[in-house]
Image (cartoon, rainbow, N blue to C red):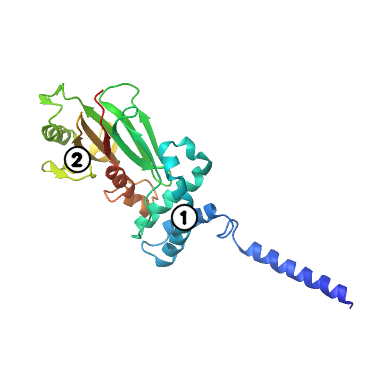
Amino acid sequence: MTLCMRILMACVVLLGLGLGARAARPEGEAGTDPVQELALATQEARKAPKGEKTVVKRLDTVVRALTPRVDALRATVSRSEALGRDNAIMIARWNDALTTLRWHGATAPAYAVVSKTTFAGFGLQLSYPYGTRWTYQYSGKNDQLLLTLTQKSLDGAVLSVVKFWTYRWDTTYSGVGGENYVKLAKTMLEVDREAMVGPGAKASPRVIVTSLSPQFPRAQFYFVEGDDADEEARVRRLNYYLKDGQRTYNVEMIVRTEAQPEEDPLTLWQRTDADPERGNLLKTLSSVEDGK
């Protein structure tokens, strides 16, 4: 056998080994595309037992590798969802991965968020994770209900609806002045307590003071839970009353507590008060005061 034939046969063998290795590796396996690798690591972490160190380490490694790219886009994404569209898939999957890490009890970076205000450029400012799982809708007119957010799970099931209401200080509501956010909360607790029905219906025994964010350290809070006729579901309503220098607000989180068929543990966890995405939204609340 000549030297040329030997070299040719060696190349054929090496080519065959390469094809075999590619066939043995699942399509899209880690190492080909960072975004796809992130999606695979997140999916693996969702299926693994909570706190599984191996999958958590893998997911954390991929997240850390993409963090500089996301950090460079934070300001752009916060100003406008449209501005982030070129990197939409990466940022959305990165946020999903952060929620998954937090479910496992691991430390994770801050979410890449979109910022909105309850009025056009003023009022209450809030932020929520960038991606298709969080959507918003303005009321379209200057009435009490200003803005509604809808939160979905990683599988697309509705987790919660967050509503932002306002009370004018020159108006009386059921005998309570709009500026008296303490008494408004107490009055609405009684109303909501009577509206909740069904087995296991419950409510806060009283309104308590809670700290939401640096600008709102003394919000008034209560919850009610039960079968909700308006939502046609079992819900837990978390109500926060706060005010800035111009108006009073009610942030109402309507969490759907009933699991869907075959729902994974991570999604069940997000249907509780432990959900980090809603918790992060509350922490971002601030006021852009305006006399209009």
Could you say where residue 163 lies in the image, as x and y percent from the top left? 29, 33
Could you say where residue 5 lies in the image, as x and y percent from the top left? 86, 73
The residue positioned 35% from the left and 23% from the top of the image is 140
Q: Residues within 10 Å of mark 1 (few under 14, many from 20)?
A: some
The residue positioned 46% from the left and 55% from the top of the image is 43
The residue positioned 29% from the left and 47% from the top of the image is 279
Side of 76 relative to 123 (left or right):
right
Q: Which amino acid does label 1 sit on?
A: Gln
Q: How many labels does the image show?
A: 2
The residue positioned 49% from the left and 55% from the top of the image is 38
Residue 20 drawn above or below residue 291: below
Out of 283 and 50, give the one closest to the viewer. 283
Tags 1 and 2 touching, CB below 8 Å: no
Q: What is the number of the mark on residue 43?
A: 1
Q: Which amino acid does label 2 sit on?
A: Val
Locate residue 191: give its quadrant: top left
Residue that protrudes farthest toward the bottom in the picture: 1
Q: What is the number of the mark on residue 173?
A: none
Could you say where residue 175 lies in the image, as x and y percent from the top left? 10, 24
Locate residue 46: give its quadrant: bottom left
Could you say where residue 179 lies in the image, as x and y percent from the top left? 14, 28
Task: Name the quarter where the C terminus is drawn.
Answer: top left
The answer to whether residue 161 of the structure is visible from this angle is no
Q: Is mark 1 on a helix, strand or loop?
A: helix
Q: Name the residue under label 2.
A: 224
Mark 1 or 2, nearer chain start: 1
